[in-house]
Amino acid sequence: MIKPIKDFSVLLAEDDSLMAEIIAFIMTEMGYRVVTVNDGAKALKAFRAEPADLVILDINMPVMNGLDALRQILREDADAKVIMLTSLADEFVITQSYTAGAVNYLEKTRFKELPAAIRSAVLHPGTMEVLLKEFARLKREEQLRGLTPAEREVFELLDEGYSHSQMEKKLFKTESTLKNQINKILKKLGVKSSREAVEKVRRKGIVRQKDKS
């Protein structure tokens, strides 16, 4: 069931106070209830306290950037609708935003298009949203397809933030067995630490190519 406009809540994370004021004004004029914060960590905290119908995240923010906040919010609620804001049109960042689960991406210079972007994301979600989610899922699976079922189980717990001791208890594995499996995971993913492994897969394996010069 579609909520009345007045019941829709929007969480806006933007560290530029003037831009935040402009965007909040636009959304208030549309009839939305707006909560504004100025960094990604505060956005995550606010979303956990009261999940918004729509989240708008600036990509470049202090404490926690928009992409990291996007990934964390979608871990809290896989169905959350998030629009990313940026000052520049960067193909790499656009791709990262969509594969991480954003439903739209908007340059700040085009803020007048925000009402249409909001209506599309919240009121009329269509096949594009489904395709983007499926694309993100496939990119994640592509990164993990080389893992055995046992290694995949270990990786999923790493992704959820389990410590090694917690995994040993949950999976009934010895320290040496778990360490061996983690080392195999790191080797297969081409990284040096569990944290790097998780971050690489969360980025869906998209790595910025170095300029050839």
Image (cartoon, rainbow, N blue to C red):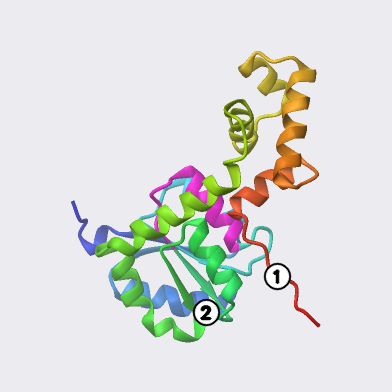
Tell me if I can see residue 195 in this picture: yes
- 1 relative to 97, above or below: above
* Vertical comparison of 65 with 181: above or below: below
Crowd tier of the residue under label 2, counting other residues whose Cα lies within 10 Å: few below 14, some 14–19, many 20 or above? few
Residue where numbered disc 2 is placed = 19
In the image, 212 versus 74, the foreground residue is 212
Residue 172, image x, y percentages: 65, 13
Magenta stretch bounds: 66-82
Element assignment for label 1: loop
What predominant SS class does the magenta segment belong to? helix
Q: Based on the displayed image, in which of its 4 quarters is residue 115 positioned?
A: bottom left
Residue 17 in magenta stretch: no
Q: CA distance from mark 2 to mark 1?
A: 31 Å
Residue 130: x and y, percent? Answer: 34, 56
| Residue plotted at (75% across, 19% down) | 177
Q: Amino acid at mark 1?
A: Gln
